[in-house]
Amino acid sequence: MKIAIVGTVGVPASYGGFETLVEHLIVGSERQMTVYCSGPHYNDRVKQYKGAKLVYVPLRANGPVSIVYDILSVLHAVITGHRHLLILGTSGAVIIPVMRIFCPHVYTVTNIDGIEWRREKWRGLAKWFLRLSEGLAVRFSAKVVADNVAIADYINHTYERECETIAYGGDHARVSLQEYAGHLGLDIERPYALALCRIEPENNVHVILEAFAGTDEELCFIGNWRSSDYGCELLKKYAEHCNLRLLDPIYDLEILFAYRSHCRVYIHGHSAGGTNPSLVEMMHFGKPIVAFDCPYNRATMEDKGMFFSSVESLQAMITSGTALAGGEALLEVAKRRYTWSVVRAQYLALFEQR
């Protein structure tokens, strides 16, 4: 069985959740895997990686050009003899009904990602196109995958289509600690809360910062503060607060391990998108988690964490004086649902069911 994986920046993973997913899907697989990669993203274009064949498309994988990037990847895969496609995201979904008509022997599994058109940042034509793409992917793919049961319920209700729920693994975040705590200047004697995300309004970064700024509680917040006006404004407003440490993005898993393993609580502000990889990664540390109250986070955590919906409710939780709880229950959920061995088996089973 030859499986082509389309729709990501590529591997080695250095971008986001889909790329990390691909990294772990190809490990130890007995199937012939081909991963389509964005040529401009890689200076060193190796031909194989962890047993998978890599094909480079001379386009970027993000923004409007991602539509063409995905379409070209699908066409190349089919022309070169692939009859099983795993499409991650719906950017190039306009090609899926075409393939269904002219290449009915090609079996397509599509992960629709989140309900992208609902995000606040999309307007007008972009929002319309994203909703169209979602509909085409759902109606014409052989199998549809969502990473969260709340999204699967939406697909079932909106399109009357069965949708598989497969989340992400997070056990890769448990690396060996190499005595990083001292080098990072972590004050182990002073407990701190940790937050980690892209600095976007839908991740409620402003809510988290305002809540902690009104307390003496220590917060370490890691994110891309300088990538948008929103982030720059927050950085300017809160950088001088002595209890807030606003750090630039960190991608090294060992350094992240140090921050995650020493925090007293994790604050998760995401309100859109489905199952968030950084949340399931953190669940493997057995720490208390306070998450924004939305169906996606409740489904991911099986209602076993704590949830906030405003500055006031978050502030009340972190200053209550009582011990935050729930870490052990979340660790049990993570071990049961969010390991890469489980996720890999679930994806490969979809192709075996053909």
Image: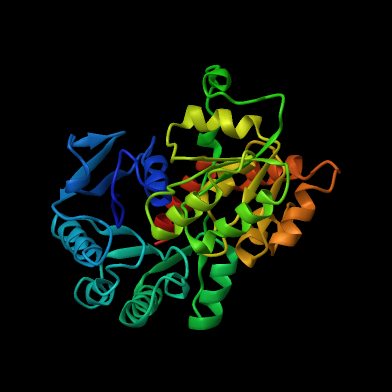
Of residues 17 and 6, which is closer to you in this image?
17
Residue 180 position in % (x across, y down): 53, 20
- Residue 39 spot, x, y in % from top left: 17, 47
Q: Quadrant of the C terminus?
A: bottom left
The answer to which of 254 and 180 lies nearer the viewer is: 180
> Looking at the image, which residue is at 22% across and 41% down?
53
Q: Is residue 184 above or below residue 73?
A: above
Figure check: 218 above or below 234: above
Q: Is residue 54 left or right of residue 326?
A: left
Q: Position of residue 77 (x, y in %)?
A: 19, 57
Q: Residue at x 76, y 48 (%)?
A: 318
User: Residue 282: where, in percent of width, then height?
Assistant: 60, 42
Tell me if residue 338 can be seen. no
Q: Nearer the viewer, residue 133 or 121?
A: 121
Please say whether residue 138 is visible from this viewpoint. yes
Count how many numbered circles sit on residues in the image: 0
Question: Image quadrant of residue 179?
Answer: top right
Q: Residue furthest right?
A: 322
Left or right, residue 104 beside residue 23: left
Give the colouring mode of the picture.
rainbow
